[in-house]
Amino acid sequence: MKIVIFSIIIIIFSQISKSQIVINEICASNFRNFYDEDNDDPDWIELYNSSDKAVNLKGWKIFDKNEIENAFVLPDTILQAKERIVIFASGK
C-alpha cells in the first residue's frame, strides 16, 4: 500500500512540475557564431515551448541572479507549440 501511495505522489508531482517553457540552450560566450539584427554577436538564450499549446510570454522576465530590477521583460510574444525563440542578451 505504501508503494502505491508513493507512486501516485511521484506521478502527481512529476505532472505538476512539468514546465511548458524551458530554457533549451544558453550561449554565454557567443563569438561570431550567431548574430543579431545589428550584426553584433551578443550572448543568447533559447526558449522552447514543449507543450501542445501556444503560450504568451508577455510579462516574463529574464535577469541575472539577484538583479530582478534590471530584468528584461518580454513583450507580447506568442510561442507556438513545439516552437523555439532566441532572445539576445545584448541590453538593447
Image (spheres, rainbow, N blue to C red):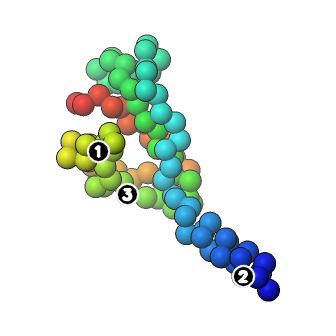
Query: Can residue 47 be spotted in the picture?
Result: yes
- 2 and 1 marks in contact (CB < 8 Å): no
Residue at 76% of width from left, 82% of height from top?
2
Q: Secondary structure at mark 3?
A: strand
Q: Position of residue 54 (x, y in %)?
A: 47, 58
Mark 1 / mark 3, whichever is N-terminal:
3
- Residue 36 sits above or below residue 12 on the image: above
Which residue is identified by label 2? 5
Query: Can residue 74 be spotted in the picture?
Result: no
Task: Give the number of the disc on residue 66.
Answer: 1
Residue at 24% of width from left, 31% of height from top?
91
Residue 11 relative to residue 33: left or right? right
Residue at 67% of width from left, 71% of height from top?
10
The residue furthest front is 2
- 3 and 2 marks in contact (CB < 8 Å): no
Q: Callout 1: 10 Å neighbours few (<14), some, many (20+)?
A: few
**Which residue type does callout 2 highlight?**
Ile
**Which residue type does callout 1 highlight?**
Asn
